[in-house]
Amino acid sequence: MKNKIVNIPPIPAVLLAIISVQSGAAIAKTLFPILGATATASLRIGISAFILLCVYRPKIKLFSAPQWKLVIPYGLSLGAMNLIFYLAIERIPIGLAVTLEFIGPLVVAVLGSKKIIDYLWVLLAAAGIMIIAPWKSDTVDLLGVIFALTAGAFWAAYIVLGGKVSKIMKGGDAVSVGMVFASILILPFGFAGQGFQFITVNYLYMGIALALLSSAIPFSLEMKALSQLSSQTFSILMSLEPAVASLCALLFLHEVLNTNEILAVIFVVIASAGATLTAKQKTVL
């Protein structure tokens, strides 16, 4: 896996990561009725950490203090992002959750630019949130919306920290060690949720598949891309995420978005794509 990932150019790497992680999220949601969101997240991240450590075999003893100071918060932000996102999609459709979560990367893309047009992208994304906001009790689950937006904040932190850590560490070392700290953060929630007691051999196999689709493969691809692309460019390439998430949820879960939710996805995709074209480009955030 390692050698194949090394040979993939950065832009295709990001696109493959998007498809992989959203397909994995749709499959993960099928486990929620049995295991719950926290146990599913713990199973996925824990197995991912084991796989990545076996593949990359990072030489931990050689890590410097500056590397530890970046890789630890990188891993914790990665873990928090995934745990809270699973809590979000437990309550709201995946396409909608990713649309809300994507506000985080959009902010990263716009930061640093003083162009007036960039504020248009922020307003467009805000309009998308406004039309799907749970103004009435019988609309979108409010807690699910809050979880998705919070996951977006951690996603923004993951992008910024990932861009920095990729400059001073090998991608494989960073993502494998980072995943260990993500596991340390998530596992207590998995045990507290008591979903582990329902794990069978078949669910364990599904956990391995999820670990590959949702973590090991996409995070390795993203780390490779972050080492060659600016944080803004990376964020903009991710503009397809809400649309891909909606399609995967439709294919795997038959989740159909209503008109307002579809408009919200379109608004956020356009906003992120626009920010890609107009935001000031930097090599490092």
Image (spheres, helix red, strand yellow):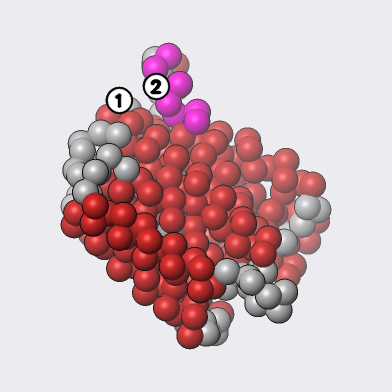
Q: Give the class, few, some or many, for how many residues have Cα within 10 Å of label 1's Cα (few <14, many ≥20).
A: some
Quadrant of the image for the C terminus?
Answer: top left
Horizontal side of residue 214 vs 3, given as left or right:
right
Q: Which residue is mark 1?
A: 168
**Residue 47 point in image, percent of width and height:** 56, 48
Q: Is residue 10 above or below residue 112?
A: below
| Residue 72 colored in magenta in the image | yes
Residue 147 visible in this rendered orientation of the protein: yes
Horizontal side of residue 143 vs 263, given as left or right:
right
User: Could you say which quadrant of the image residue 61 lies in?
Assistant: top left
User: Tag 2, which secondary structure?
Assistant: helix
Instruction: For marks 2 and 1, give the CA distance.
Output: 7 Å
**Residue 136 point in image, percent of width and height:** 68, 75
What numbered label is drawn on residue 183? none
User: Could you say which quadrant of the image residue 207 lies in?
Assistant: bottom right
Q: Magenta-highlighted stretch: main secondary structure?
A: helix
**Residue 96 point in image, percent of width and height:** 51, 70
Q: Which residue is mark 2?
A: 67
Q: Give the class, few, some or many, for how many residues have Cα within 10 Å of label 2's Cα (few <14, many ≥20).
A: some
Tell me the residue at 67%/64% (across/down): 142
Horizontal side of residue 23 vs 31, given as left or right:
left
Magenta highlight range: 65-73
Q: How many marks?
A: 2
Which amino acid type is shown beneath numbered disc 1? Ile
Residue 225 visible in this rendered orientation of the protein: no
Tell me the residue at 24%/43% (across/down): 114
Tell me the residue at 43%/56% (across/down): 103
Q: Disc 2, disc 1: CB below 8 Å?
A: yes
**Residue 132 point in image, percent of width and height:** 54, 72
